[in-house]
Amino acid sequence: MDVQVPELVSRAVEALPAAHRPADLESLLCGYLSHLLERNREINLVSRKDTLVHVERFTFECLFLARVLYEERGERRAAAKPPKLLDIGSGGGFPGLVLKIAMPDLELVLVEATRKKARFLADVAAGLDLRQTKVLGGRTEDLLQVEKVSGVRELGHRFDWVTCKALGTLQNSAALAEPFLAPHGVHWTFKGSACREEIEAAGGFFRQRGLAPRRVERIPGAADSYVVGVERLSASGAGRSRASRPSR
C-alpha cells in the first residue's frame, strides 16, 4: 500500500459526519484506492499527473455527496428499503464505489463501457466483498435497447438515485439519467463554476422531460464546486425543488 493513501483517506473522510461513517470506512477506502493506484499504471483510471491530489479530491467530493444522500435518505426514506443507485460511466469508481463503501446497504449497479475498467470495478467489488453490487459492461443507451428487445425490465425507471461524474453538461447527464429514474428519483452529479448557468440553460429541457432541480450544495473547501441534484417528478408533475440557485 502506498504510504500516502491512509493519510489522504483520513483527510477525505472528514467530508462525512462521524455518525454516518461505517466502522470499516477507512480500511475499505484504503484497499480500494491502493488497488486503483496500482492498476492505474496499466489502465487510465485517473489522471497520471498529480494523481494523489486528484484521488484525494475525488474521494472527498464523493464522501460529501454521501453526506447529502444520508440527509436525503433521512428526510425521504426513513422507513423504506435500501435505495437503489445506478452509476453511469463508473470509470475508476468515482462516485459509485466510494458511495457504496460509505453506504454499505446501497443496491448498486455500475455501468462502464470500457472492458478493462469494468473488470477493475468487478475486481474491487469482489475483493472488498461489496455485496449487492453489480457491474454491467456497455453503454447505458445500449442497455435500455436490450431491455426493450428482451421485454425484461430491470433498469428502466427503477432507481432512486442515478449518479455520474464528468459526463458533459447538466442537461447531457440528466438526459442519460432520466430513463433510469423512478418517480421522485434524483440524478446527482458534480458541477463547477458554470453550475448556475447550466441549471438555467437546462430549464426548458427539464420541463419537457418532467424534471426539476432539487438541491445544489457547495462542496466545502472549494469555491466553485457543487453537488447538484435533479429530481424526476411524479406523473402528475407535483414535485418539490429545494434549489433555485447554488447555496452559499
Image (cartoon, rainbow, N blue to C red):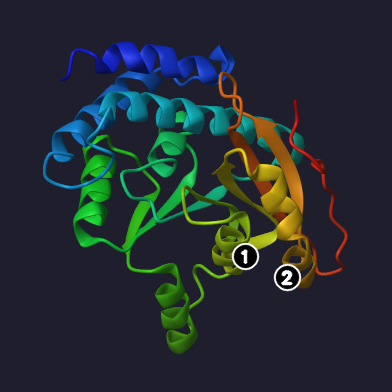
Q: Position of residue 99 (x, y in %)?
A: 46, 36
Q: Which mark is residue 178?
A: 1
Label 2 neighbour load within 10 Å: few <14, some 14-19, many 20+: some
Q: Are marks 1 and 2 in contact (CB under 8 Å)?
A: yes
Rendered residue at 70%/49% (across/down) = 197
The amino acid marked with disc number 1 is Glu
Quarter location, residue 98? top left
The amino acid marked with disc number 2 is Arg
User: How far apart, in angstroms, are the residues tagged by discs 1 and 2?
Assistant: 8 Å
Q: Is residue 78 visible?
A: no
Rendered residue at 51%/75% (across/down) = 153
Residue, disc 2: 209
Q: Quadrant of the N terminus?
A: top left
Question: In the image, is 132 to the left or to the right of 246?
Answer: left
Quarter location, residue 31? top left
Question: Between disc 1 and disc 2, whose residue precedes?
Answer: 1
Q: Quadrant of the C terminus?
A: top right
Label 2: element kind: helix
Q: In this view of the protein, which residue sits in the foreground, 103 or 119?
A: 119
